[in-house]
Amino acid sequence: MVLHPLLLLSLLAAPATDVAAMRWEKRVLLVRASGAHDPSLLAQRRILQRWRTGAAERDLVLVEVQGETVVGASDTAARLRRRYRLPDTGFMVVLIGKDGGVKLRQSRPIAAAALEETIDAMPMRRSGKR
């Protein structure tokens, strides 16, 4: 089954709040791309689409910074770039734990297996608090 990108975003979308307010409730996959059609962004979406059940079980939400547009959070693009040291151009993906700390950072899409392994090793996940 292939999900339309907007449906995928709705399944993994963060609530309409800022990333800082998600602390202790959600893990955030923050993706910075040049635009909505960036090949690396599309690849990351495909990975999440195939892993959507695993992502949901791990309280993972997707926030995208597409140029100056933010999808999935109420933050501005400039604020997220500054706070999470995202580049002004190019692709970057950052996994943010429930404690608000950066757990993983890559300049290429992160595979589902790497996300799963990283999240499952987190103290809150191991302690059963999801």
Image: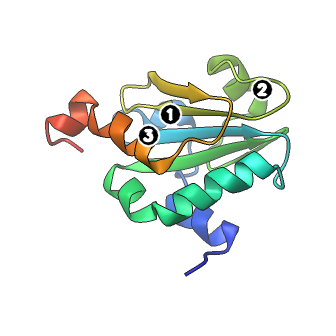
Measured as percent of width and height from the top left, residue 94 is found at: 57, 31
Q: Amino acid at mark 2?
A: Ala
Task: Judge from the rendering whether residue 1 lies leftward or rightward of residue 121; answer left or right.
Answer: right
| Residue at (50, 33) in percent of width and height | 95
Task: Judge from the rendering whether residue 15 lies leftward or rightward of residue 97; answer left or right.
Answer: right
Q: Are marks 2 and 1 in contact (CB under 8 Å)?
A: no
Q: Quadrant of residue 117?
A: top left
Note whether 47 is above or below 35 in the view shown.
Answer: below
Q: Amino acid at mark 1?
A: Leu
Q: Earlier in the sequence, mark 3 or mark 1?
A: 1
Q: Residues within 10 Å of mark 1 (few under 14, many from 20)?
A: many
Q: Quadrant of the N terminus?
A: bottom right
Q: Amino acid at mark 3?
A: Ala
Q: Secondary structure at mark 3?
A: helix
Mark number, residue 78: 2
Which colour scheme appears in the figure? rainbow
Q: Which residue is mark 3?
A: 114
Q: Earlier in the sequence, mark 2 or mark 3?
A: 2
Q: Which residue is mark 1?
A: 95
| Residue at (23, 38) in percent of width and height | 125
Measured as percent of width and height from the top left, residue 106 is found at: 61, 29
Labels in figure, total: 3
Note whether 40 is above or below 86 in the view shown.
Answer: below
| Residue at (45, 38) in percent of width and height | 22
Between circles 2 and 1, the one closer to the viewer is 1
Q: Secondary structure at mark 2?
A: helix
What is the spatial separation of the Cα atoms under label 3 and label 1, in whole angstroms?
Answer: 11 Å
Residue farthest along the bottom direction in this orientation: 1
Q: Which residue is at the front of the view, 2 or 17?
A: 2
Note whether 11 is above or below 64 in the view shown.
Answer: below
